[in-house]
Structures are given as C-alpha cells and as structure tokens.
Amino acid sequence: MSWVFFSYPSKKSKISVFTERGTVILESLDVYELNSIWDGERDEFYRPQFHFSPKKWEMALHNKYGVDFYSSPNLKDWTYMSRVEGFYECPDIFELPVDGDPKNTKWVLLDASNTGYKLGQFDGTAFIPETPGMPIDFGRNHYATQTFSNIPKSDGRTIQMAWMKSASFPGMPFDQQQTFPSELSLRTYAEGVRLCRAPIREIESIRGKHYKWSNEILERDEDLLSGIDHDLIEIIAVFDLTDATLPEFGFFLRDALIYYYVAGSQIFVEHNNISKTATLKPENNRISMHILLDRASLEVYAN
C-alpha cells in the first residue's frame, strides 16, 4: 500500500510517498519534485487525483488551462498524456454504471466548482467529453468534492464528500465543515443521463426518534411537524401532485424554508437568510425530498 501526499511550495509540485508493511509505516520518506511536469509553461499545478490501473498510475492535475492527465509506472517519473480544457481546481474522475447497468458505463470528470461536471469516456490516456458542463449542486457552499478510493468491490458504491466553503458557523467551536457523505449514481432522464447524489445509508445509525405519516391530504397552513424539535432533523417526504390544488407546499424549519412551487416546477430553499431556487420537474407526478438539517448546515436532496 502507498500513502500519497501532495504539496506545491512556490508552484513547484512535490509528491511524498509512504509505504506500509503490515501495521508499521516506514519512517523513511522520499520526496520527489515533479520536474518532468514543470516545464515553465504550465502554471498553477495543484490538488491532483490519483488512480491506479493495470501496470501504471494515472493522475489528473489541474492547471490554469484545465485538467492534464499524466501516467507513471512508479509515482516518480511522469509522462504527459492529454488535456481537457475548461475545468477548475481539485479534479476528480471516476466511472459509474448508467441506471445500474455494469455493461453501460460512463466516466465522470468534475472540478471544485458546482458548474462543470462532464460525462464521457476515458481510455487510460484521454478523457473524451460527451456532454457540456452540468451543475453537481445548486447551493452556494458545495465545493472541492472528492470521492473515496478503494471501497471494497463487495460494496461497490462511489461515495463523495464536499467542503462547505464560505459558510459561517456562529457559536460553534469549529470553522468549516464537510457535507454528509453521499452515494453517486448515473440516472437517465428525458434530458439525458445525469449525475445524482443521495445520503449514504449509514446515517440511519444516528437517527433518534421516528415519526411517520402516510396518505395525508395536506390543507393550507397545516403543519404535520408541529411540536417536533427541529434542532437536528432528517426528513424523507414524497408528495403526490395528483389533484393538487395548493400552489406551493413544503417545510418551515429552524432557520430554514424549503418550498416547492407547483406551477413553475421550482424548488426554493432558504437557510440563514440565504436562498436558492432550482428547476425540479415531477417524476411520475411526484416530488420527493430528503432533508438533513444540522445545527450549522442544511442539505436538501430532491427527486
């Protein structure tokens, strides 16, 4: 096993490799300057993503032009392979099945921002985009996502976390936080294949009290959550729009408002006086929401 750490003092990229034997990490540390990458023309190299395929390492590395791909047999000597322009820092690349079909897969290439994941094919040398850039999130604090490596094949999930950049945490003993881990999948819609996220199932283990309603017909100003503590709450809700007469519906929670506007097919989310709106079309005439309200954050997954 190799433990790889990356640094970029004075724009001279360096890679540090620890090796492990049993449970003892060797004290020796080898540091290699990636001079084979630095050629004086490529600027702002940092935050790479590594992938090991048969017989070689592959690296996606951001620079001011986009994402460059390199290969190495030993993590020391790197060969430039290709470039995809139009991406920002913190690249990540991984393969996912479409609609759960292992015979139909696409590669996902994304960066730190919310504006630019692309689907395509990666042959070990070059990424060939098949779509334009598409948003991975519609909030303002979802940044620098990274997926976990080496998840057992028996599990098979691709799990991602993001940095909640630019958020404020008044009264908290920390500064900055990560999102809840989410499972990624590719699903086919009328508009095409899209990257989807859902909270990982492991968060079920931290649930406390349970409340459940079924087949409720909601009336104006009706509050099913009246009397329930909103300090820490997870909500999974499915709304059937058949014969719906209300123009909007949703949740009014502590420091948070989540509403769906039926006529415009829009979901509106406000948290700590900051709001966002996104298009959300019904699926089979239904709208589903999965809401995670923590003391310092709000995450809303829809459909």
Image (cartoon, rainbow, N blue to C red):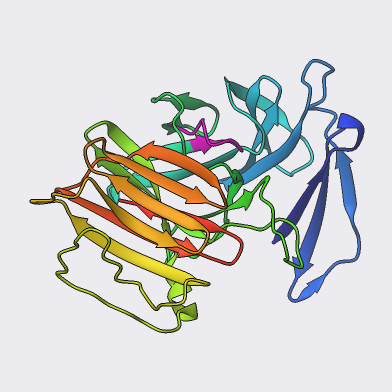
Q: Is residue 137 visible?
A: no
Report the front residue among 140 and 64: 140
Report the front residue among 160 and 59: 160
Q: Quadrant of the N terminus?
A: bottom right
Percent position (x, y) of residue 7?
Answer: 83, 43
Main SS of residues in magenta = loop
Decide if residue 226 is on the left or right side of residue 123.
Answer: left
**Residue furthest toward the left?**
243
User: Residue at image x 19%, y 62%?
Assistant: 218
Decide if residue 260 is on the left or right side of residue 151.
Answer: left
User: Residue at image x 20%, y 47%?
Assistant: 283
Decide if residue 234 is on the left or right side of residue 23.
Answer: left
User: Residue at image x 80%, y 53%?
Assistant: 17
Q: Eyeballing the image, is 202 above or below 279? A: below
Residue 59 occupies which quadrant of the picture?
top right
Percent position (x, y) of residue 65?
Answer: 67, 19
Q: Eyeballing the image, is 288 above or below 196? A: below
Report the front residue among 99 and 275: 275
Percent position (x, y) of residue 227?
Answer: 39, 78
Would residue 113 be counted in the magenta stretch? yes
Q: Which residues are magenta?
A: 109-118
Q: Is residue 186 visible?
A: yes
Percent position (x, y) of residue 257?
Answer: 43, 54
Residue 129 occupies which quadrant of the picture?
top left
